[in-house]
């Protein structure tokens, strides 16, 4: 599926709600473009022009003619923001109904709002082209929020685990698989997206956290998408003195200690070293392959 960005309820308007927001690129962009006037508690959320709202109608027509779906992702706002301008969510609901050839990937850090707001938007039930996602960055957020996601009305439910800030066990929602089949938890998630942080103050992501989620998803048959390492790339395999050869006089290095705490003292041959080489150079390969899996869901229009 091809994709587009569209901000349905405001132009870069939001506020921080958790540790995943600490270094928000959208906040930085709003500060740069609009002096931060749309960010933070009480900030005004901007309303787009009619031309902006008509773009998805054109995308939908093109997708229908091409015979395939296109995904739309609101990237710099939260569709379930409490501070959305009055009337905009109703307008957004109509737009979703009018564009059945677009897959609306509604990602939120406010998953507790989703059920009530989706029910208000779609009293007859959310259409099949609504995919609902929750941002989860650590185990605490997983334990608090995933149940809210799986009980919300949506055709596809996914996790965006970016920036991933610690190990996360998803057994309660997609496993465990060592139990007899009749005792296993039913699959409640369709897709897991994992990624490291980018930007000036990016925090490194431990490769073990990334591999664990990949292995959990593969064992359960859940689509797994590894988006990026972010600013930091693995500097060794944490298996011995095989530190990747890089010119460390020009880059910043550090390592995860025995408790997976971050130590910024430089490379360590016997622990997981991470090198800050930039998002582009770090890439998105995990164990020599790219993970690009999407949910195998058929939409009915």
Image: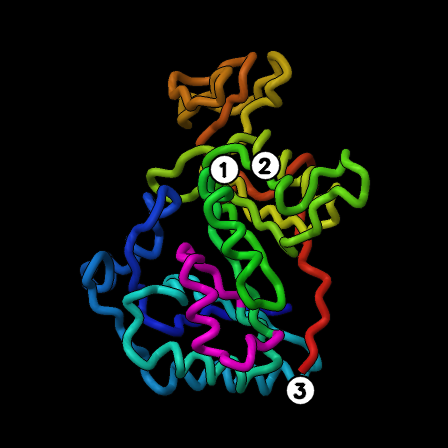
Query: Which residue is drawn at the image coordinates 40% and 57% (left, top)?
Result: 110
Badge 3 density bin: few <14, some 14–19, many ≥20, Cα 10 Å? few
Residue sitting nearer the eye, 278 or 161: 161
Label 2 residue SS? loop
Query: Which residue is drawn at the image coordinates 65% and 56% (left, top)?
Result: 190
Cα gap from disc 1 to disc 2, whole angstroms:
7 Å
> Is residue 134 highlighted in magenta?
no
Tell me: 297 left or right of 20: right
Give the vertical position of 42 relative to 247 (above or below): below
Compare marks 3 and 2 and give the one earlier in the sequence: 3
Residue sitting nearer the eye, 196 or 96: 96
Pointer 1: what residue? 139
Compare marks 3 and 1 and give the one earlier in the sequence: 3
Mark 3 in CB contact with mark 1 (< 8 angstroms) = no
Pointer 3: what residue? 65
Query: Which residue is drawn at the image coordinates 50% and 79% (left, top)?
Result: 122
Q: Name the outermost residue toward the front.
A: 183
Cα gap from disc 3 to disc 2, whole angstroms:
42 Å
Cα gap from disc 3 to disc 1, whole angstroms:
43 Å
Give the vertical position of 209 relative to 266 (above or below): below
Label 3 residue SS? helix
Residue sitting nearer the eye, 131 or 283: 131
Which range of residues does the magenta coloring cover?
105-128
* Quarter that holds the N terminus: bottom right
Pointer 2: what residue? 169
């Amino acid at each position: 599926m091809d994709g587009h960005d569209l901000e349905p309820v405001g132009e870069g308007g939001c506020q921080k709600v958790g540790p995943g927001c600490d270094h928000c690129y959208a906040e930085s962009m709003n500060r740069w473009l609009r002096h931060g006037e749309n960010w933070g508690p009480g900030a005004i959320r901007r309303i787009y022009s009619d031309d902006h709202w008509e773009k998805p109608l054109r995308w939908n027509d093109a997708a229908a003619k091409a015979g395939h779906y296109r995904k739309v992702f609101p990237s710099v706002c939260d569709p379930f923001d409490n501070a959305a301008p009055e009337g905009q969510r109703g307008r957004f609901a109509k737009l979703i109904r009018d564009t059945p050839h677009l897959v609306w990937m509604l990602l939120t850090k406010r998953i507790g709002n989703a059920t009530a707001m989706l029910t208000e938007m779609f009293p007859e039930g959310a259409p099949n082209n609504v995919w609902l996602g929750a941002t989860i960055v650590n185990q605490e957020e997983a334990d608090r929020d995933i149940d809210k996601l799986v009980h919300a009305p949506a055709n596809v439910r996914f996790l965006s685990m970016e920036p991933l800030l610690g190990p996360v066990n998803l057994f309660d929602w997609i496993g465990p698989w060592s139990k007899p089949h009749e005792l296993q938890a039913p699959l409640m998630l369709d897709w897991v997206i994992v990624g490291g942080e980018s930007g000036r103050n990016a925090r490194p992501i431990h490769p073990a956290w990334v591999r664990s989620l990949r292995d959990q998803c593969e064992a359960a048959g859940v689509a797994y998408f590894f988006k990026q390492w972010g600013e930091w790339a693995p500097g060794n395999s944490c298996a011995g003195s095989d530190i990747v050869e890089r010119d460390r006089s020009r880059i910043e290095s550090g390592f995860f200690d025995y408790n997976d705490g971050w130590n910024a003292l430089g490379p360590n041959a016997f622990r997981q070293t991470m090198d800050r080489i930039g998002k582009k150079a770090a890439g998105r390969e995990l164990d020599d392959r790219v993970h690009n899996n999407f949910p195998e869901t058929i939409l009915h229009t």
